[in-house]
């Protein structure tokens, strides 16, 4: 567990990031083969135009409201708050689990799907790891009448069979990837290869805030909906801004989407929660901001988990969506300038968060999101949360996909690590 420092921010008031070259300070950029440059530049320009176009914003807004369940609820959580044992503390949960398809991934999938239509593309390719992003993309493609190809490693297909069935029911062509690690990394390579060969007809719908520019900024723009809704909802419910905002960090899209609208509010502490796995000391974790160093991965410069020779290290997390050795360049930058903080929750702390949330608020959350809850319990126990605090936690998704893993919970009620 890393200590959470006090916020010290060098980030200026006008911060919107990134610059023209897709850089957030030193981080980001475009480390890709020449053949991809033109396609990325085209997406970049199209997104900037669309984002500034009131007609695009209106259409996006309408579809999010009418079909995706936005705005999602802000759930006051008094029983969870009382377990913290902090006088006057209020906790609010941002319920991205209640968005269509059960996670925040739909916000980005819809936004980029509309952009693809606007660019005249008729076909989408995407990567998926655990399948949540693939399901969101397949859903949007069905809705917008786009043809859909999802690349997925064979190892992930075996582990996440339910999501493979969902994607196929929705009409997606799910293509097994047998090369490389047979997981997310290999799936991304295959999706990019397909895109390069078909850029005239095809948009590559990437799922998180990593990768080459413009993806970190574009995905953040779409996910910022989470934070802008939550900011207004907390103001209305609590009468003031939150003191602490927590979100889990895999690639970083739900976190940066939640944090971004609060960046100009210096008194709001923004805390990213990474997967501590079996503990940082064991090496079996996925805590990139906490234990990584700057390097190049998947087309951008960012914090990555690497050995002294620059080899990307193997990660572990109980939550598939956090099990990744990189993190978005914007979060890397915000860490370095002191505007965000980071901490970790181990597998056991996440399970404790899951169990506590189930029994206090009646919400079966995703294992990814359970890390944010677990970290909150831990911070409270360590005296790191002040009295009368207003705390906002992002619940990025629902737990249905994790039931097989969570079944173990039923056996570990007596585990002292989980019940203390
Ligand atoms: C994919 C996923 C994550 C991790 O991705 P980020 O880009 O870090 O948000 C977290 N929670 C859920 C429910 C997910 O499906």
Image (cartoon, rainbow, N blue to C red):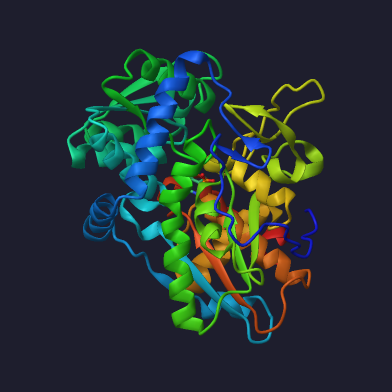
Residue 211 lies, with reference to residue 412, above or below; the image says above
Q: How many marks?
A: 0
In front of the other: 227 or 74: 227
Image spot of residue 340 (x, y percent): 67, 57
The reply to whether residue 185 is visible in this rendering is yes
Left or right of 209 on screen, residue 401: left
Residue 410 in view of the camera: no
Which x, y percent locates residue 22?
55, 36
Residue at 73 percent across and 56 percent down: it is 338
Q: Is residue 307 left or right of residue 272?
A: right
**Which residue is drawn at the image coordinates 47% and 28% (left, top)?**
156
Image height check: is 69 above or below 294?
below
Query: Where in the figure is residue 363, as x and y percent of width and height?
Result: 45, 65
Specify the quadrant that holds the C terminus. Answer: bottom right
Give the left or right position of residue 233, taking residue 150 as reference: right
Residue occupying the point 56% across, 19% down: 181
The image position of residue 359, as x and y in percent, is 51, 70
Q: Is residue 289 above or below residue 151?
A: below
Q: Image point 39% across, 35% down: which residue?
A: 45
Observer-nearest of 132 and 111: 111
Is 300 in front, or is 312?
A: 300
User: In which quarter of the view is residue 244 placed?
Assistant: bottom right
Foreground: 342 or 331? 331
């Amino acid at each position: 567990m890393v200590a959470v420092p006090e916020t010290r921010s060098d980030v200026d008031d006008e911060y919107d990031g990134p610059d023209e070259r897709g850089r957030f300070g030193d981080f980001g950029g475009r480390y890709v083969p020449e053949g991809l440059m033109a396609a990325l530049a085209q997406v970049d320009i199209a997104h900037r135009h669309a984002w500034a176009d009131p007609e695009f914003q209106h259409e996006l807004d309408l579809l999010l409201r009418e079909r995706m369940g936005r705005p999602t609820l802000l759930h006051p959580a008094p029983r969870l708050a009382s377990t913290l044992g902090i006088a006057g503390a209020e906790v609010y949960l941002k319920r991205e689990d209640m968005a269509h398809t059960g996670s925040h991934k739909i916000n980005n999938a819809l936004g980029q799907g509309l952009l693809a239509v606007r660019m005249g593309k008729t076909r989408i390719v995407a990567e998926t790891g655990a399948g949540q992003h693939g399901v969101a993309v397949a859903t949007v493609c069905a809705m917008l009448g786009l043809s859909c190809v999802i690349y997925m490693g064979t190892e992930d297909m075996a582990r996440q069979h339910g999501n493979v069935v969902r994607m196929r029911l929705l009409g997606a062509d799910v293509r097994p990837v047998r090369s490389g690690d047979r997981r997310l990394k290999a799936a991304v390579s295959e999706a990019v290869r397909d895109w390069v060969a078909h850029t005239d007809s095809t948009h590559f719908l990437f799922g998180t805030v990593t990768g080459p520019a413009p993806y970190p900024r574009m995905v953040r723009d779409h996910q910022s909906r989470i934070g802008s809704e939550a900011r207004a909802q907390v103001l209305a419910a609590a009468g003031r801004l939150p003191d602490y905002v927590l979100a889990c960090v895999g690639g970083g899209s739900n976190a940066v989407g939640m944090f971004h609208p609060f960046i100009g509010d210096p008194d709001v502490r923004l805390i990213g929660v990474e997967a501590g796995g079996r503990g940082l000391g064991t090496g079996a974790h996925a805590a990139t901001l906490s234990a990584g160093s700057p390097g190049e991965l998947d087309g951008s410069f960012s914090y990555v988990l690497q050995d002294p020779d620059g080899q990307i290290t193997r990660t572990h997390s109980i939550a598939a969506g956090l099990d990744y050795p990189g993190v978005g360049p914007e979060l890397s930058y915000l860490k370095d300038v002191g505007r965000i903080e980071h901490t970790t929750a181990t597998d056991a702390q996440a399970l404790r968060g899951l169990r506590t949330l189930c029994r206090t608020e009646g919400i079966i959350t995703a294992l990814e999101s359970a890390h944010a809850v677990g970290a909150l319990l831990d911070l409270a126990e360590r005296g790191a949360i002040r009295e009368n605090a207003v705390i906002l936690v992002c619940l990025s998704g629902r737990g249905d996909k994790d039931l097989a893993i969570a079944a173990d919970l039923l056996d570990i009620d007596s585990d002292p690590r989980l019940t203390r």
